[in-house]
Amino acid sequence: MSKQFSTYIFDFDGTIADTLFTVIRIINNNKEHYGIDGIDETEIPRFRNMSVRYLLKEFNIHLVQVPKFLRDIQKELGNHISEVKCFLDMDTVMQTLKKKGAHVGIVTSNTEKNVSQFLFRHKLEKIPSFVIAEPSLFGKHKKIKKAVEKYHLNPQKTIYIGDEIRDIEAANKAGVASGVVTWGYNGKEILSKHHPDYLFDSPKQIVSLIE
């Protein structure tokens, strides 16, 4: 096993689970309830190059509304979790890392119930050594630090892999290496501008870190 990293912590939405279009459908089907105009799918490329804070401004969602907005969406997502696919080869990536002796974990803003059901459905429930799921858009660095402290991880040998700007920021604040995938919620262009330690265009590139 590579001496560089002994622990690989993954984000869930947009990194392992392809939830984007399911979430968009949930929002559009409940736009009156959320008090927004809905999401035009032709605008997705533009939205992918925005930070979460800019997106909230775009849809006129105030920070005080975010917790309830997030809870509502995640609750509804739970009703559709059987429709959510695993990104191609990400299951193999996680299995390979574990087989090679790495610790694999998940730190996410989604709910533990949604993550558990997804992992079980895709026969991945035995892969993660831990799952820390605490619904909140911000403060993810605290969850990563919690994982490092609770499971006695070496920060210098730990990488957090997500798909958004806030994942890069969270990894940096938590004192672990930052990795981002380009197939998730944020696009490659804006991710590159935030200088992650690693930028992955394919799942195979993640595995290359340990080979």
Image (cartoon, rainbow, N blue to C red):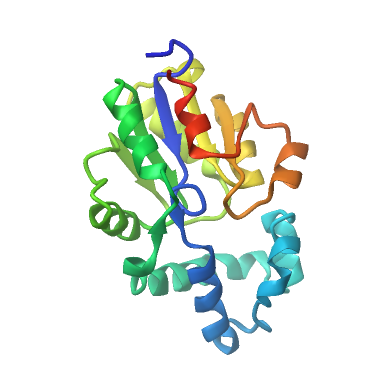
- 57 vs 30, nearest the viewer: 30
Q: Residue 112 sits in which quadrant?
A: bottom left
**On screen, 35 above or below 117?**
below
Q: Residue at x 61, y 45 (%)?
A: 182
Say left or right for 117 vs 159: left
- 58 vs 203, nearest the viewer: 203
Which quadrant holds the N terminus?
Answer: top left
Residue 185 spot, x, y in % from top left: 60, 55
Q: Residue 105 sits in which quadrant?
A: top left
Q: Residue at x 55, y 30 (%)?
A: 174
- 132 vs 121, nearest the viewer: 121
**On screen, 107 above or below 83?**
above
Total labels drawn = 0
Q: Residue at x 75, y 67 (%)?
A: 57
Q: Residue at x 28, y 53 (%)?
A: 122
**On screen, 159 above or below 162?**
above
Residue 44 spot, x, y in % from top left: 68, 66
Which quadrant holds the C terminus?
Answer: top left
Say left or right for 173 vs 75: right
Q: Does residue 3 appear anywhere in the picture?
A: yes
Q: Does residue 170 appear anywhere in the picture?
A: no
Residue 176 spot, x, y in % from top left: 54, 25
Q: Residue 89 sits in which quadrant?
A: top left
Say left or right for 67 vs 146: right
Residue 177 spot, x, y in % from top left: 56, 25
Residue lying farthest to the top in this orientation: 3
